[in-house]
Image (tube, rainbow, N blue to C red):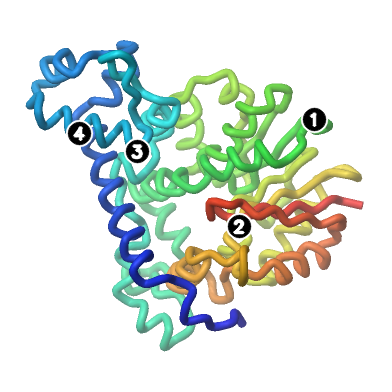
Amino acid sequence: MPTIDHFIFDPVANMQQRDAGRFIAYIERAALKLGILDVLKDDGGSTLFELAGLLGLDGRALAFFLSALCELGYVESMGGYFGVTDFGRSVVACEIPAANNPPNPFDSLWSFLSEAIREGGPQVHRVFEEHTNFFSACYEDPDRLRDFCNFMLGFSVPAGREIAREIDFSESREVLAVAGGLGGMLHEIMFAHQHLRGTILESPRVCDIARDYLAHIGTRASRRIGVQAGDLVGSYPNADVVLLDGVLASWSDESALRILQHSLSCLPRGGRVVLSEFVLGLGEERRGYPSLLSLILLLAYERGARTRTKKEFFSLLEKAGFADLRYIVVPDGRGNIIVGRKP
């Protein structure tokens, strides 16, 4: 049971952060809709007037807009020419969801938060008839499934960059992303560590979307990633490192333990499991998002799915048979990293 803290958020700062996030999403969406990032990505740089003429935009309004894009890090100005930054290029290539505006797959469930709190369980059946599980509701509808996969990229891509920076992969060769979605996290790790090969283990329908996504990226790193149909409760292909990106939060303790045990079984001695999770905690580890995520899990996933404390994650890992546990705090709140080693 998490400790209740009525001062997790500074109300004014939280309102400002919320509003800023909404405005940034609107700006990003408009930049893509107008084609600004695509043009600047492809032509190597344009002046304000060239860009306005090419896209049929008002020059004065575009000047204000480009200034905002520069401040937010999507675009850079070089001697009167504008170009796309690496971050802006990744927004186009990776189709980060806030920019391309796929619907937030959880929006329709929030109307039933009071029922979820009252009943202590998911409310999927109230939105998606004949379904009690959010995953099954997604798999039934190809568009909904694609939207969900794109939505999750917004979390997995930056988390993958953090893992690539924080974890030593020098003695590893094969990385397995269990329930790895479209491979956003795995691709970032492959991109940073060019000796690695990776595999995404996913449901057959997600595998098809993942293959399209990796082909769309078209990097050398994406070509070192294979996609394999499988299931969380089956056996996993052998690997030196298993990635679990927010996977355990979606399941009860009993299910999470089984996932960790399967992960252990596919690793050699000394192999590692790497978790990327939002962790409930206090002090410097405290984040607002884990508490909000807990409500999404309550609304959408199996009964017992939840965010956990560092102690609870460590307990699950130890029960599964992992040792030498490490906990890495990610300063910007993108989730924290937990590593366990097979003895």
Q: Nearer the viewer, residue 252 or 338?
A: 338
The 10 Å Cα crowd at callout 3, few under 14, some 14 to 19, many 20 or more, is some
Q: What residue is drawn where x is 66% and y is 70%?
A: 309
Q: Nearer the viewer, residue 19 or 32?
A: 19
Using the numbered discs, state the Cα–Cα distance from disc 4 to disc 2 in whole angstroms.
35 Å
Which amino acid lies under the numbered mark 1 shown in the image of this protein?
Ser
Q: Return the residue at label 3.
A: 72
User: Which numbered mark, 4 or 1, is in the foreground of this view?
Assistant: 4
Q: Return the residue at label 1.
A: 170
Image height of 31 relative to 220, above or below: below
Residue 132 x %, y %: 44, 70
Which amino acid lies under the numbered mark 2 shown in the image of this protein?
Glu
Label whose residue precedes the other's in the sequence (1 or 3): 3
Residue lying farthest to the front in this orientation? 79
Give the left or right position of residue 281, taking residue 298 as reference: right
Residue 89 x %, y %: 40, 26
Which amino acid lies under the numbered mark 4 shown in the image of this protein?
Phe
Which type of secondary structure does the marked residue at label 4 adopt?
Answer: helix
User: Which numbered mark, 3 or 2, is in the foreground of this view?
Assistant: 3
Q: Nearer the viewer, residue 225 or 185?
A: 185
Which type of secondary structure does the marked residue at label 3 adopt?
Answer: helix
Q: What residue is drawn where x is 69% and y is 71%?
A: 254
Which type of secondary structure does the marked residue at label 1 adopt?
Answer: loop
Using the numbered discs, state the Cα–Cα distance from disc 2 to disc 1 in whole angstroms.
23 Å
| Number of the label disc, if any, that sits on residue 277 | 2
Label whose residue precedes the other's in the sequence (4 or 3): 4
Using the numbered discs, state the Cα–Cα distance from disc 3 to disc 2 in whole angstroms.
26 Å
Residue 138 lies in what quarter of the image? bottom left
The 10 Å Cα crowd at callout 2, few under 14, some 14 to 19, many 20 or more, is many
